[in-house]
Amino acid sequence: MNEDTGSDQNCKGCSANVRISPEEIAALFNPNLRIKAVKVVTEAEYADRIDACLACPALQYGTTCMHCGCLVHLKAKLRVSKCPFPYAPRWEKLASLSV
Ligand code: SF4
């Protein structure tokens, strides 16, 4: 993880940095990793989820969902992830997710 500990980039609840680079995300979801049980979304689905998050009033620091505390750039990669926005989850209406 990034070692930059500037105060505007730290989680309110701990000292962890809330920023994660695209390179760090790519390393975490590298298909060569032996973690086969983790299902990820397509690039189009990921982009749509991130766009929804970036337009969401619940996004803090440009990285963190205030409803679940997750780093959205990681959460959005996981197929099983759900948007926790109350009463109207913002990922459910995305075009890329309709089957
Ligand atoms: S409520 Fe949903 S759309 Fe909003 S930041 Fe959280 S995960 Fe993203």
Image: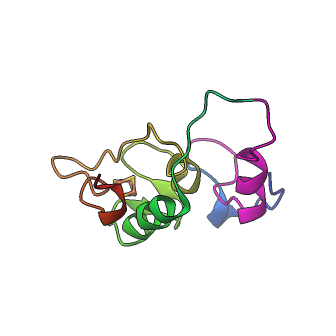
The residue depicted at 72 percent of the width and 29 percent of the height is 35
**69 vs 73: above or below:** above
Is residue 72 in the magenta section?
A: no
Task: List x then y, in percent, for residue 37.
Answer: 62, 27
The chosen color scheme is rainbow
In this view, the residue in front, 9 or 91, is 91
Is residue 33 in the magenta section?
A: yes
The residue depicted at 78 percent of the width and 30 percent of the height is 34
**Picture quadrant where residue 40 is located:** top right
Task: List x then y, in percent, for residue 74.
Answer: 58, 50
Question: Horizontally, is 6 left or right of 13 in the view?
Answer: right
**12 vs 62: above or below:** above
In this view, the residue in front, 40 or 1, is 40
Task: List x then y, in percent, for residue 6.
Answer: 73, 65
Task: List x then y, in percent, for residue 17.
Answer: 70, 53
**Picture quadrant where residue 45 is located:** bottom left
Question: Horizontally, is 42 left or right of 27 in the view?
Answer: left
Q: What segment is highlighted magenta in the picture? A: 13-34
Please identify the residue farthest to the front as the structure is shown. Answer: 99
In this view, the residue in front, 1 or 30, is 30
Question: Horizontally, is 79 left or right of 57 in the view?
Answer: right
The residue depicted at 48 percent of the width and 65 percent of the height is 44
Principal secondary structure, stretch drawn in magenta: loop
For ligand 1, the image quadrant comes to bottom left
